[in-house]
Amino acid sequence: MKAYRYALILFVAVALAACKTTTKTATFPATAGAGEGLYSTQPSPLPNRGGAEGEAGSSELGLPEKSLLAQRIDSLLLTADTLLQSTQLGLHIIDLTSGEIVYAKGERQRMRPASTEKMVTAITALDCLGPSYCLTTALLSAATVSGGTLQGDLYVLGAMDPLLSVADVRRLVSQLKAAGVKKVAGRLVADVSMKDEDEYGWGWCWDDENPVLSPLLCGGKPALIDQLRSALRTAGITVSKGTAKGTFPKQYDPADTTSASKRYELAAIRRPLTEVLKPMMKESDNLCAEAIFYQIKRPTPSPSREGGERLALKNPTGKHWGRKRSAAIINELIERTANDQCSMFNVQCSMATGLVADGSGLSLYNYQTPETFTRLLTYAAARQDSIYLPLLEALPIAGVDGTLEKRMKDTPAAANVRAKTGSVSAVSTLVGYTTQRSTGHVFAFAILNNGLPRMAEGRTLQDKICVLLSE
C-alpha cells in the first residue's frame, strides 16, 4: 500500500510540474544541424532561423523533445529532494532555437551568483565597448621634444591592464626612446583618472586574498610607476623633477588614432578586451573581471570633425569613474533585456534585477536572478559578431579547459557545454550554453545553488542537468 501511495504521489508531482512548465514561444536564431555541438574546432554561429518545415528549429521537431525533457528534469529534481528541502535552487532554461522557455523553477529569486557575475560583466562590456576595444596604457605629454629633452612633464596614463608585464614596460620605454626622448625636464606624473580611489571592492571579505584595484598595474600589482622608473634608468633616460600624481590636462582618446589627441602619445601598450576576457572567464580571474568592470563607460558625442562616438575617460560630472557608474550601465542593459524578453514571450515583465556590487562576484552584496542570466544570454546570442562569438571563445568548455576541465567528461555535455562557473562558501552556480545533440537546438541555462552544506552536491546536480540538456 505504501509503495502504491508513493508511486501515485510521484506521478502527480511530475504531472503538475510538467503542466507548470512554460511553453511560450518567440523567434530566435537557429543552430547548427542535429548532432553538432557548440564546440568543434571553432564556435558554431547562430544563423537566422529558417528552413523547411520539420528541419531543426521547427516546433514539429522541438516540442515533443522539450516536453519529455521537462519531465526528465522534474524526475532528476525529485531524486535531489533531500538536498533541495534545505537549500535554494534557481533554474531557468531557454531554447534559443525554437524560442521556448523549457524549464523554470525559482527563476525570479534573488540569489548570490558568485563568479557567474563575471558573465554579466563580460556581456555588458562587449555590448558597450565592442570586441575591438583595447585597454591602453600610455605615456603622454603636451610638451615638445627638443635636443633629446622633453620640455615638460611625462604622464603615465594607467588603464588598469591586469596583464601588463615588466616586458611591456620595457616596450613603453623603447617607444619613448624611439620618439627621441633622452631626458624629461619635468616630472613623471601618475594619471589614475580612469577610476575612483577605492583599492578594494564594495562588500569584499577582509580575510580573502583580494587583488588591489589600481589603474597602475604591472604584474597584477600596483607597481607600474616603480617598474617604469627602473626601466627609464636602465635605458639612460633621466627625470629631472621626480614623481607626482595628476591628470593629463589635454583631451586624449586612446581609441582615436586619427585625431589631434594622437600627437600627445609618445608610447602606448594596447591590450585587446578579448585577450583579458579569456583568463577572466576560463580561469575566473578576479582582477581581470574588475579591470573590465571599470572599463565599462557610456559613449559620449565626439567633438571631432569626424563625428561618431568616443568613450569618456571620466564620467559626466568630471569625477573619476566609480563602481556605481559601471553598475548603473549594467543595470540599464539588464532592464533593456527584460523588456525585450517580456515582449518576445508576451508575459508580464518582472524587474527583479538583483544588485550589482562589483565585476567579479567576490562581493557578498551581489544578487542576481536566474531569469536575468538567461535574458543576457539570449541578448548575446542575437548579436553574433559583437558579443556571442567572442563570449563563446572565452567561456570554459566542459571536459576541455578552464574551470570546467574536470567536469562532465565522457558525457554528451563534454566539449559541448560552454559556461561560467561560480563558487564561494555555500554557493555553487553555472550559467551558459549547450547544444542538444539529438536536435541541434541551442539552450541558454542558469543554475544557481545557494545554502549548500557541500558545494560538490550543487556541482553534481548542475552537471546532471547539463547532460540531460546535451543528449
Image: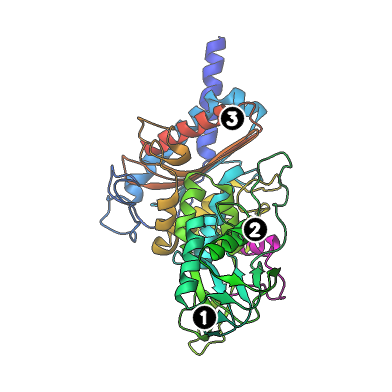
Expressed as whole percent of the image width and height from the top left, the position of residue 246 reads 70, 72
Query: Which residue reaches farthest top?
Result: 1
User: Could you tell me which residue is drawn at 41 percent across and 52 percent down?
Assistant: 392
Q: Which residue is mark 1?
A: 148
Q: Which residue is mark 2?
A: 214
Expressed as whole percent of the image width and height from the top left, the position of residue 4 reads 52, 14
Expressed as whole percent of the image width and height from the top left, the position of residue 171 reads 46, 64
Dot 3 lies on which element? helix
Which contiguous range is marked in magenta?
311-331
User: Could you tell me which residue is drawn at 55 percent across and 52 percent down?
Assistant: 219
Mark 3–mark 1 CB contact (< 8 Å): no
Q: Which residue is mark 3?
A: 455
Dot 2 lies on which element? loop
Alpha-carbon neighbours of circle 2 within 10 Å: few (<14), some, or many (≥20)?
Answer: many
For residue 236, above or below residue 348: below
Can residue 102 be seen here?
no
Amino acid tagged 2: Ser
Alpha-carbon neighbours of circle 3 within 10 Å: few (<14), some, or many (≥20)?
Answer: some
Alpha-carbon neighbours of circle 1 within 10 Å: few (<14), some, or many (≥20)?
Answer: some
Mark 2–mark 1 CB contact (< 8 Å): no
2 or 1: tag closer to the N-terminus: 1
Expressed as whole percent of the image width and height from the top left, the position of residue 271 reads 47, 62
Amino acid tagged 3: Met
3 or 1: tag closer to the N-terminus: 1
Can residue 321 be seen here?
yes
| Magenta highlight on residue 313 | yes
Q: Splitting the image into 4 quarters, where does residue 16 fall?
A: top right
Foreground of the two, 280 or 56? 280
Foreground of the two, 91 or 39? 39
Q: Nearer the viewer, mark 3 or mark 1?
A: 1
C-alpha span from label 2 to label 1: 32 Å
